[in-house]
Amino acid sequence: MQNTELILMLPVLLFSLSLHEFAHALVALWAGDDTAARAGRLTLNPISHIDPVGTVLVPLICLIQSLSGGVGFFFGWAKPVPVNPNRFKKLVWDVYVSGAGPLANFILAVIFTLIFKALLMLDVMSSERLSPEMIRVLSALIINFIVLNVILGLFNLIPIPPLDGSHIFFHFFVRSRTRDNIMFMVFHFLERFGFLILMILLFAVPHELNPFYLMFGKVMQVIDWFLRL
């Protein structure tokens, strides 16, 4: 990646994370819990969602590493939105609240894919209308929005605590079980070692065998196919 493209990743990541947390807070309010709203988290203002480590330190480390010639991999997380499931109208709202964040990221990826497709069809991004540098920067900005939001959406659906997917997994496969049930014990194990398992999944499992990267690759293939139509 060019330096300009790398720097553009930071505001894209910040906005995408803010939208993710805003979606959680909004659906939680619809579910009957105003905890996030009262905490000032029902907003797209990124300042309200900043986590010192996940939103500042980790992305900066990724940026520095990339600018130094390392792998251009960007990632991060925002401060989790506080919710009180006991205030939800129905238990199933936990699924909706948890799925709202990843869904918001997928919607954003779809929107920017459609924008990119429209620009290509209207021949806006041509050398006759824009300079080569402007075309490169605009393309990088849109592609960053698509890629980062696909990554955030898929990653947060992994059914391992503390990710959003774990709440969905818990609702359908664990909630109705007793503590001596194998599913309950599996979930308890994931709660204890979830972060370590996620690190192994992301950085130790080879990409060609990694279900997360395989799924990401399939989604990006579909997007690439659509853009080439």
Image (spheres, rainbow, N blue to C red):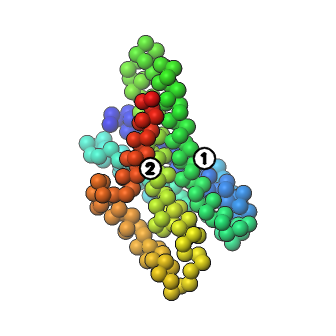
Left or right side of 167 for 27: right
Residue 216, percent across and down? 40, 49
At label 1, the amino acid type is Asn
Whether residue 222 is visible, yes or no, is yes
- In this rendered view, identify the residue nearer to me: 51 or 173: 173
Q: Secondary structure at mark 2?
A: helix
- In this rendered view, identify the residue nearer to me: 5 or 53: 5
Query: Would you place residue 27 above or below residue 14 in this image?
Result: below
Q: Residue at x 49, y 77 (%)?
A: 183
At label 2, the amino acid type is Ile
Left or right side of 201 for 86: right
Q: Residue at x 36, y 52 (%)?
A: 214
- In this rendered view, identify the residue nearer to me: 45 or 227: 227
* Foreground label between 2 and 1: 2
Q: Quadrant of the N terminus?
A: top left
Q: Residue at x 47, y 19 (%)?
A: 123
Query: Would you place residue 165 above or below residue 45 in this image?
Result: below
- The residue labelled by disc 2 is 151
What label sits on residue 45 in the rendered view?
Answer: 1
Left or right side of 187 for 214: left
